[in-house]
Image: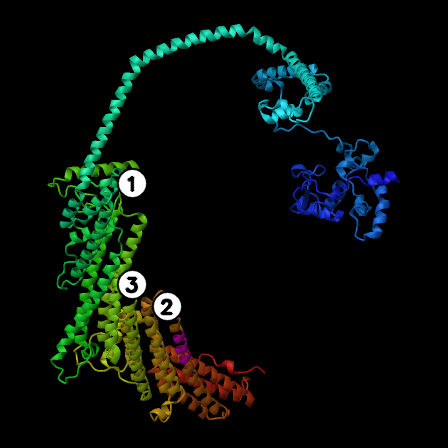
């Protein structure tokens, strides 16, 4: 029982983690907590597998690198880490610990991983197949379940050599063996020497015991005597060695005995030390003997060495006297000379720098801003690089900075003055840019200062100039009305402008547009010159100068606007007569050498600043054009308040539109971008004009239709000329009036050799359609609106014609007694005339419509379908009229003499009347088609009547009478124009019985 308890008191592996030293809870209460700790801190999950890291260097000894499933990981932890003290005697541990576990289970109801892990389950029946096949203890018969199925060759199949792997022979290693033979022999010698040393130390345990014995003997000697600072002069040390001498109460006998005892101890300590020294000497005896034997030889070598050193020192002293000292003195003199030259150059630089302010004042007096700024920049660079720390120049840098600020203010003032004078020049002065050289100088100076605000300044000044020129132009034209204004009422400028008539208004616009174009051309010239200056400053444009620029690059652009010679570099020859130029030239050469040494970019502008400045210039030009358009829009809006533009005629509005379009086009050529505002108001006014244009014609067409009596009208000469002009030229335009008054109106309208009997309304409609097309040519930007309104007009004519003719609306509108077939025929023919011209109108609009509105052309096809349906409806009306007449006659038909019967006589008479009404109006093809349908109706009704009367084609008397009437009926068509062969066979009236 005691043995069993002792075994239970052994250290339990799950009580403490061996590799987490800093963990706060170092003792675990149960195996479950230990397992959870291993899973949290000593386990990694790779994909769906778990890798145990519980071990040194995070490597588990029993499961180093393999990943296992969750269940296998728990089994591994329970087996190898929770209880691993028995070295694999798993079942014995379970049997030995089970009583305690059983006793503990009564107290603790939690599941025990130590007990529950060894329960057998069905998963323990799995066997590793490679382990079964490679088990050497199995008999042959236990592995024959493979060979009996797949043959005896399955288990021991012959493996053929791979054709991709060459055959290796001993000769292939000759080169390697030769290369490593020397190192191999050296290695073998080292191994042999180490083996010999191991043979000498055959008994290492004996040596260890000997060392421990020596250490014990040396430990008998107090550490006090081993200290490096041991000295009996020290009071503490002396007291520690002779403690009884401190005690004054001790008697002489005790002192004597203590001294004797101390002497014996010290003698014993001395013997121990001497014995250890003797042992060490005996061990190192060979080394001591070698040192003693080589002492004389070493002394001799030292003597020879001292003699050689003395000779070498003598030779070195001789060489130093004869060769080195003179050369070193020469080097010292050369260095002194260089220092004097450097001092002289620095003094010259100081002299030149001292005169810089006077030169800058001289340059500013001649408006050479760029030269002054370059000189300031050069001086500041020399002060910072070559003359730094000189006390006399301590204030010069700040003075130059103040001068630079002053020059900046002068540049801005001169620029504002220049652009004000430039933009306010009289518009009669056609020179695009005056004093171009001055502008170039100012712009170069502002670019030198990295001041790009001058573009915005020019834009604001241009806005002011445009506003002023617009007001001035309006005032000049309004002043003409002051002489005739006698009512004494003070009016505003807009009210006075609305008093201008159309010619005066157009003159105002022409002058206004001309003056604005002058301002815009000056702005464009400014933009071009500035863009060239910016390109020169950025190293992208050639400088129009006879001298070669030091920043010249190949493939540079040619300047396109600048016309004066420009040198964008520092030109120090501007004041060649000055006394200061030699020193300043030296300064410039010094700065150039410094710049070339440090590879400094000499361009005034970087690529980013260049792109930004060019973009700002282009935007400025566009903004100026937009502002000019906005001011014109305000003028238009002020004049259009009383509906003046809507009252213009087509020709007047077209002239006004062309005037505006020309100005807008010129502005687009200047700025390279379309402006919207002026086009927008023109589009708005165009839409209003088109609306009024359409309403006038719509009302006129409605009024004419309300008064139309639907009788054939004579065709005036102007309408025939219009149709002939369209046929000959292919253009839908109104021709000029001819002066030949001898021509008389004609009965028909001749269109491409085809006669059209028409009413007066359709002639007006054709003219209106041509007017719409001509308006489209004059105002092409209104194409979508015009198309919509034209479609509305054509549809209105169609619907109103249907209402008045087929719907009999003309009976009440103009007092007609009835709608005759002639009225219907005229309506059909008028519709056909409009259908004839719709494709031409469609092609005309197709050329003018924008691409995005091309789908609107489908409305023409819809109109054509509506017209054709209307024409077909009129044809059906003819047939229905005759169908009612045939039903009234044939339903009373009796087969009896005399022949031809009255019924057939009446039918033939009605056919003749209808033919006479249609043949002079409708084309023969249409008349023939109508009568074919009428003939089909006649045969259908006659067939029904004969079947009702019981008459058949049996050759009897009644059959003969009916055939006599049919011969009369077919003969009546022989005399009708175009219908001679319409009735060929009448046998299909007989129904089979």
Q: State the residue at coordinates (13%, 79%).
A: 482
**x and y, in percent, of residue 434 in the image:** 15, 56
Q: Is residue 932 above or below residue 707?
A: above
Whether residue 506 appears in this view of the structure is yes
| Disc 1 from disc 3: Cα separation | 43 Å
Which label was assigned to residue 600? Answer: 1
Expressed as whole percent of the image width and height from the top left, the position of residue 159 reads: 70, 29
Label 2 near label 1: C-beta < 8 Å?
no
Q: Which mark is residue 674?
A: 3
Q: Nearer the viewer, residue 794 or 264?
A: 264
Q: What's the magenta region? A: 862-871
**What label does residue 926 carry, if any?**
none
Q: Is residue 20 above or below residue 843?
A: above
Gap between marks 2 and 3 measured at Cα: 20 Å
Closer to the camera in the image, 585 or 520: 585
- Label 2 element class: helix
Q: Neighbour class for label 3 at 10 Å: few (<14), some, many (≥20)? A: some
Judged left or right of residue 590, residue 99 is right
Mark 1 and mark 2 lie on one chain; the one further toward the N terminus is 1
Q: Quadrant of the N terminus?
A: top right
The residue tagged with tag 3: helix, strand or loop? Answer: loop
Q: Is residue 352 magenta?
A: no
Q: Secondary structure at mark 1?
A: loop
- Give how far apart the Cα atoms at labels 1 and 2 are: 58 Å
Residue 559 lies, in percent from the top left, at 22, 49
Side of 297 where 333 appears, left or right: left
Q: Is 870 part of what is drawn in magenta?
A: yes
Disc nearest the viewer among 2 and 3: 3
User: Pointer 2: what residue?
Assistant: 853
Where is residue 513? Give x, y as percent.
20, 67
Question: CB atoms at circles 1 and 3 under 8 Å apart?
Answer: no
Kindly indicate the quadrant of the structure image that contains residue 716. Answer: bottom left
């Amino acid at each position: 029982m005691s043995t069993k308890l002792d075994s239970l008191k052994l250290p339990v592996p799950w009580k403490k983690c061996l590799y987490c030293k800093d963990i706060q809870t170092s003792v675990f209460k149960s195996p479950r907590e230990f397992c959870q700790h291993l899973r949290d801190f000593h386990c990694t999950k790779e994909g769906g597998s778990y890798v145990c890291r519980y071990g040194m260097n995070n490597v588990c000894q029993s499961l180093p690198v393999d990943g296992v499933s969750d269940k296998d990981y728990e089994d591994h932890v329970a087996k190898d880490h929770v209880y691993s003290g028995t070295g694999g005697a798993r079942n014995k541990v379970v049997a030995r610990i089970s009583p305690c576990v059983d006793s503990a289970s009564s107290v603790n109801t939690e599941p025990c991983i130590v007990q529950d892990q060894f329960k057998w389950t069905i998963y323990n029946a799995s066997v590793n197949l490679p382990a079964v096949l490679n088990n050497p203890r199995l008999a042959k018969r236990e592995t024959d379940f493979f060979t009996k199925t797949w043959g005896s060759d399955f288990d021991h199949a012959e493996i053929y050599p791979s054709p991709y792997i060459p055959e290796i022979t001993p000769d292939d290693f000759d080169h390697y063996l030769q290369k490593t033979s020397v190192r191999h022999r050296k290695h073998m010698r080292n191994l042999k020497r180490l083996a010999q040393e191991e043979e000498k130390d055959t008994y290492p345990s004996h040596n260890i015991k000997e060392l421990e014995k020596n250490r014990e003997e040396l430990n008998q000697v107090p550490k006090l005597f081993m200290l490096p600072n041991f000295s009996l002069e020290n009071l503490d040390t002396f007291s520690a060695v002779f403690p009884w001498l401190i005690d004054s109460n001790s008697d002489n006998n005790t002192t004597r005995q203590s001294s004797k005892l101390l002497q014996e101890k010290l003698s014993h300590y001395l013997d121990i030390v001497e014995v250890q020294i003797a042992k060490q000497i005996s061990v190192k005896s060979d080394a001591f003997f070698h040192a003693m034997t080589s002492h004389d030889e070493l002394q001799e070598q030292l003597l020879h060495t001292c003699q050689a050193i003395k000779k070498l020192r003598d030779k070195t002293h001789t060489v130093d006297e004869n060769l080195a000292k003179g050369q070193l003195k020469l080097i010292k003199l050369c260095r002194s000379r260089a220092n004097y030259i450097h001092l002289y150059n620095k003094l010259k630089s100081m002299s030149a720098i001292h005169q810089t302010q006077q030169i800058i004042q001289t340059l500013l007096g001649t408006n050479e801003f760029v030269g002054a700024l370059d000189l300031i920049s050069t001086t500041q660079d020399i002060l910072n690089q070559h003359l730094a720390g000189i006390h006399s120049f301590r204030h010069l840098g700040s003075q130059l900075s103040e001068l630079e600020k002053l020059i900046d203010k002068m540049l801005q003032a001169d620029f504002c003055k220049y652009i004000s004078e430039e933009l306010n020049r009289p518009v009669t002065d056609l020179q695009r840019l005056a004093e171009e050289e001055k502008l170039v100088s100012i712009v170069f100076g502002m670019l030198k200062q990295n001041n790009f605000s001058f573009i915005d300044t020019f834009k604001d000044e241009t806005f002011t100039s445009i506003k002023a020129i617009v007001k001035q132009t309006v005032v000049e034209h309004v002043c003409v009305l002051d002489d005739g204004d006698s009512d004494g009422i003070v009016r505003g400028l807009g009210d006075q402008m609305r008093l201008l008539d159309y010619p005066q208004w157009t003159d105002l616009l022409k002058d206004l547009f001309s003056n604005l174009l002058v301002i815009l051309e000056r702005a464009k010239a400014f933009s071009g010159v500035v863009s060239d200056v910016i390109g020169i400053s950025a190293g992208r444009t050639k400088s129009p100068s006879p001298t070669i620029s030091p920043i010249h690059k190949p493939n540079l652009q040619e300047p396109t606007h600048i016309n004066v010679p420009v040198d964008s570099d520092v030109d120090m020859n501007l004041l060649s007569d000055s006394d200061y130029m030699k020193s300043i030239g030296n300064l410039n050469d010094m700065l150039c050498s410094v710049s070339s040494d440090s590879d400094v970019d000499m361009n005034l502008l970087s690529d980013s600043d260049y792109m930004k400045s060019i973009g700002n210039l282009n935007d400025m030009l566009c903004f100026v054009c937009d502002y000019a358009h906005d001011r014109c829009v305000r003028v238009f809006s002020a004049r259009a308040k009383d509906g003046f533009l809507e009252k213009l005629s087509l020709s007047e509005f077209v002239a006004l539109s062309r005037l505006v379009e020309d100005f807008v086009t010129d502005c687009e050529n200047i700025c390279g971008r379309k402006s919207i505002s002026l086009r927008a108001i023109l589009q708005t006014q165009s839409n209003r004009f088109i609306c009024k244009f359409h309403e006038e014609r719509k009302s006129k067409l409605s009024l004419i239709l309300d008064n139309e009596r639907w009788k054939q009208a004579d065709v005036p000469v102007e309408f025939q000329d219009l149709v002939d002009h369209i046929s000959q030229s292919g253009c839908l335009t109104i021709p000029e009036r001819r002066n030949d008054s001898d021509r008389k109106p004609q009965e028909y309208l001749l269109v491409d050799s085809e006669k059209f009997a028409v009413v007066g309304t359709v002639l007006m409609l054709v003219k209106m359609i041509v007017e719409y097309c001509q308006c489209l040519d004059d105002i092409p930007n209104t194409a979508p609106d015009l198309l919509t309104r034209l479609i509305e007009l054509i549809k209105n004519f169609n619907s109103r014609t249907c209402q008045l003719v087929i719907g009999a609306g003309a009976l009440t509108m103009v007092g007609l007694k009835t709608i005759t077939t002639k009225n219907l025929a005229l309506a059909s023919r008028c519709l056909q005339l409009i259908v004839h011209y719709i494709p031409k109108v469609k092609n005309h609009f197709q050329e003018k419509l924008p691409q995005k509105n091309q789908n609107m052309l489908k409305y023409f096809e819809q109109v054509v379908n509506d017209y054709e349906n209307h024409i077909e409806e009129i044809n059906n009306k003819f047939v229905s009229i005759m169908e009612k007449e045939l039903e009234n006659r044939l339903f009373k038909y009796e087969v009896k003499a005399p022949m031809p019967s009255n019924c057939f006589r009446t039918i033939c008479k009605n056919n003749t009347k209808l033919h006479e009404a249609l043949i002079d109006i409708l084309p023969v093809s249409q008349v023939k088609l109508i009568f074919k349908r009428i003939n089909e109706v006649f045969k259908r009704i006659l067939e029904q009547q004969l079947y009702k009367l019981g008459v058949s084609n049996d050759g009897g008397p009644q059959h003969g009478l009916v055939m006599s009437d049919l011969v009369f009926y077919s003969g009546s068509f022989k005399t009708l124009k175009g219908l001679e062969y319409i009735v060929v066979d009448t046998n299909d009236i007989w129904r089979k019985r």
